[in-house]
Structure formats: structure tokens, C-alpha cells
Amino acid sequence: MTLPDIAPPLLRWYEQNKRTLPFRTVSTPYRVWVSEIMLQQTRVSAALPYFERFMAELPTVADLAACDPERLHKLWEGLGYYSRVRNLQKAARACVEQYDGQLPGYFEELKRLPGVGEYTAGAIGSIAFGLPVTAVDGNVFRVMTRLTADSSDVTSPETKKRITALVQDLQPEDRPGDFNQAMMDLGATVCLPNGVPKCGSCPLSALCESRRLGSMTEFPVRPPKKPRKKEDKTVLILFSENKTALHKRGNTGVLKNLWEFPNAEGALTEKEAEIWCAEKGMKLLRTERLPSYQHVFTHVEWKLSCYGVWVSGQPEEFLWLDLEGLEQRAVP
């Protein structure tokens, strides 16, 4: 489908309705980059306090490159998807080594940085450097599939490539960053996901094919999600002499190299949990059942049974910390 020029009405709308965000108020390449990495799979409202704290402590690429990994994980604690921040530091170190502590101002060089894909390179390139490149995220795919009533699978590479090319054709050369941000904001605040879009507030509603058909909520089209794998685990909060035990995860798999409370596979009964502790060489003083909870990852869901266990003895396989020490460790 061929669209008329959507840039003029979209940019007029953006000038009047754009979200006030700290990485827009001061949009250096570094700030744009960190914000884009944080916003991957994270809501803007949830990411903003992290962004402000991160910038206060690590205001430059060189600061990020030199940061102790333990401290870096602590700054990221709660955002999840910790591989993002590990790649962020790898890329910062590459910038220090190869680009004098600055982000490169070329699209292809940005894409070569760890953790920087097509979208992130497009966002940094267009917003921070004024490059005429696209930044097509989930918001933009939703806007475009609704505008064109495109019923093809939005997760397929062919569909993504075609929509990205269409967005590139519509992008004005003189304001690529504003255009990309306008598309993002339109998707985030008007052309809403998982519900009825606010078509009455949309500057493109007169051009929207799905609105003409009354089928806005049918787009974008995605295949059914595969059910997540479910796993039972038992978490043990061990207390000994005003200290609590932590265990460091291995170098592979989910949450690698992060600290966690000791845990065991399966949903242990209270008696089984006590036996587990005894086998670690601890003398049991008291056990208390704690509330169970679930933690959902992209492809797996953990159902966690929890116990507080007061013990005598501090096995060396665990790190025993007081409250101050616990607060310095990144525990997902």
C-alpha cells in the first residue's frame, strides 16, 4: 500500500504532544544510547529513575567503561535482562579503545558495538547525529500495520524488512530524529497496544486503513506465543548471627554471574528444606514458611517456594553478609 506523506501532520502533532523525557532534554549520543538500551523490554515510567541514577553516577562513556561490574549490576538491579548492561559496558570499552571515548557517528559503526542492533543504531544515529536512518520498534510496527491494515506476520523478517523500507521512504531527510521519535510517541501514547487505540487524538486517523475498516485492534498480527516452560524452585533465606547468605550464579544461563539467595530445584516441603540445610553442614534453629511467588522470564516461568531458616554455622560455599553488605550486591 502506498501512503501519502504522513510526516507533516505527524511532526506538527509531535511538536505539541511529545513526551518530556530527560534523554530528550539533553540528548547527547551517550544519553540517547543508555536510554535506548534501558527501554528495551522496559516501560518508560519504570526506566526513568534508573536512567537518572545511572547518569548521575556514570555521566560519560569512560565512566561506564571503568565501572566495577559489581557496582554496574547494582545500578541495573531491578531492570532485568542483565545481558543488556554487560553489553553496554563492553560497547563503552570499545568506544574508549577505538573512538576516543565517544560513540561513533556512523550507522554501520554503531551496529558493530556489542548490544547495538539495527533499531538501537537507528535511534542513536537519527536522534543524536541526525542521520537519515530508521528506528523501527514495536510501537512503529503497530502504527504502520494499523495504518496499512497489514495482516502479514509482524514477527517475520520479510514483514519487518518491508515495513522498515516503507518508514524509510516516509522519513523526511531534514528531521529524521524527530520523525522517529514522533512515531514512537504515537505508538506509545495514542496507537496503544493491547487495547483500543485513541483514534480521536491521532493526527493520522484520516489516513488509517484499519480505522476505516473498524479493525484497529486486529493489528499487528502475530503467531500464537509458545507456552513458557514452568519450573519449580525452593528459595532459602538463611540467617546466621545477623548475617544472610548469598550464592553467586554460574557463568552461563539466565541471570549469569549475579547474586541470589541459595535455592534448590523443585518445590521442597519444610522437612526437605531442613534436610537440604543440614546436608550443607548447618545446625537448624528455626524454620518459617514464607509466601510463595512467581517470576516470569521471556521463555521460562519460575514458581518459587520460600523458607526463612535460622541456622548455626556459615558454610564457606555461601557469602554471608550483614544488611549493609546485602545492599551493595545486585540480587535480581
Image (cartoon, rainbow, N blue to C red):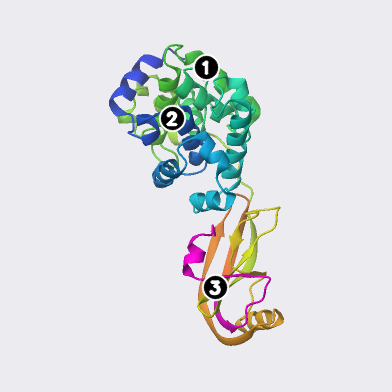
Q: Please report whichever mark, 2 or 1, sits nearer to the chain's N-terminal start.
A: 1
Residue drawn at x 40%, y 16% is 7
Q: Does residue 153 show up magenta in the picture?
A: no
Task: Tell which tag, 3 or 2, sits nearer the viewer.
Answer: 3
Looking at the image, which residue sits at the far left? 16
> Mark 1 touching mark 3, by CB under 8 A?
no
Front-most of residues 178 and 313? 313
Percent across and percent down for residue 235 are 59, 70
Residue linked to disc 3: 244
Q: Which residue type carries mark 3?
A: Thr
Residue 184's disc number: 2
> Mark 2 touching mark 1, by CB under 8 A?
no
Residue drawn at x 54%, y 63% is 294
| Residue 293 visible, this angle | yes
Task: Tell which tag, 1 or 3, sits nearer the viewer.
Answer: 3
Separation of residues labelled 2 and 1 (CA atoms)? 14 Å
Please identify the quarter of the rendering in which residue 178 is found. top left
Q: Which residue type carries mark 1?
A: Gln
Depicted 74 relative to depicted 303: above or below: above
In what element is the residue under mark 2?
Answer: helix
Determine crowd level at label 1: few under 14, some 14-19, many 20+ residues with C-alpha closer than 10 A.
some
| Residue 79 visible, this angle | no
Residue linked to disc 1: 168
What range is drawn magenta here? 306-331
Separation of residues labelled 3 and 2 (CA atoms)? 44 Å
Q: Which residue type carries mark 2?
A: Met
